[in-house]
Image: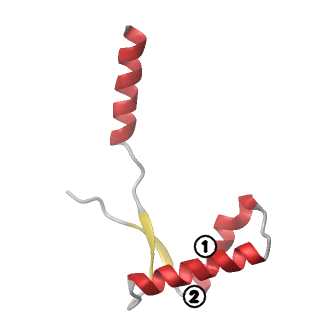
């Protein structure tokens, strides 16, 4: 019984301490344009057959090359 209670407590605490969300932003770029550019970078990295462990970093380089920055979104209060 104590184990179940401790597990439930840990899970509820873990849910409260979620990592902050972030997104790609560029001045004067709409959400649709950002989505299109991100999709293009992901497609290009996929075509290049980049190893799985390096894909996220390569997509980030591609987005930065297009003028985007990856910024944290402030938590709503």
Count the marks: 2
Residues 69 and 48: in front is 48
**Upstream in sequence: badge 2 or badge 1:** 1
Q: Residue 33 at x, y = what percent?
A: 46, 87
Residue displayed at 63% across by 74% down: 42
Residue displayed at 40% across by 81% down: 31
For the residue labelled by badge 2, is the local secondary structure a helix, a strand or a loop? loop
How packed mark 2 is, by other alpha carbons closer than 10 Å (few <14, some 14-19, many 20 or more), is some
Residue 11 at least partly seen:
yes
For residue 39, side relative to residue 9 (left or right): right
For the residue labelled by badge 1, is the local secondary structure a helix, a strand or a loop? helix
Q: Which mark is residue 14?
A: none
User: Quick one: quadrant of the C terminus?
Assistant: bottom left
Q: Residue 64 at x, y = what percent?
A: 58, 81
What residue is pinned by disc 2? 66
User: Quick one: quadrant of the N terminus?
Assistant: top left
What residue is pinned by disc 1? 60
Q: CA distance from mark 2 to mark 1?
A: 10 Å
Q: Residue 52 at x, y = what percent?
A: 74, 60
Residue displayed at 69% across by 66% down: 55
Q: How is the image coloured?
A: secondary structure
How packed mark 1 is, by other alpha carbons closer than 10 Å (few <14, some 14-19, many 20 or more), is some
For residue 59, side relative to residue 11 (left or right): right
Task: Tell me the quarter of the picture where residue 13 sits.
Answer: top left
């Amino acid at each position: 019984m104590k184990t179940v209670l401790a597990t439930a407590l840990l899970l509820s605490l873990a849910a409260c301490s979620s990592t902050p969300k972030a997104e790609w932003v560029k001045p004067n770029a709409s959400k649709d344009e950002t989505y299109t550019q991100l999709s293009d970078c992901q497609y290009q990295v996929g075509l290049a057959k980049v190893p799985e462990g390096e894909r996220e970093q390569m997509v980030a380089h591609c987005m930065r090359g297009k003028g985007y920055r990856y910024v944290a979104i402030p938590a709503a209060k």
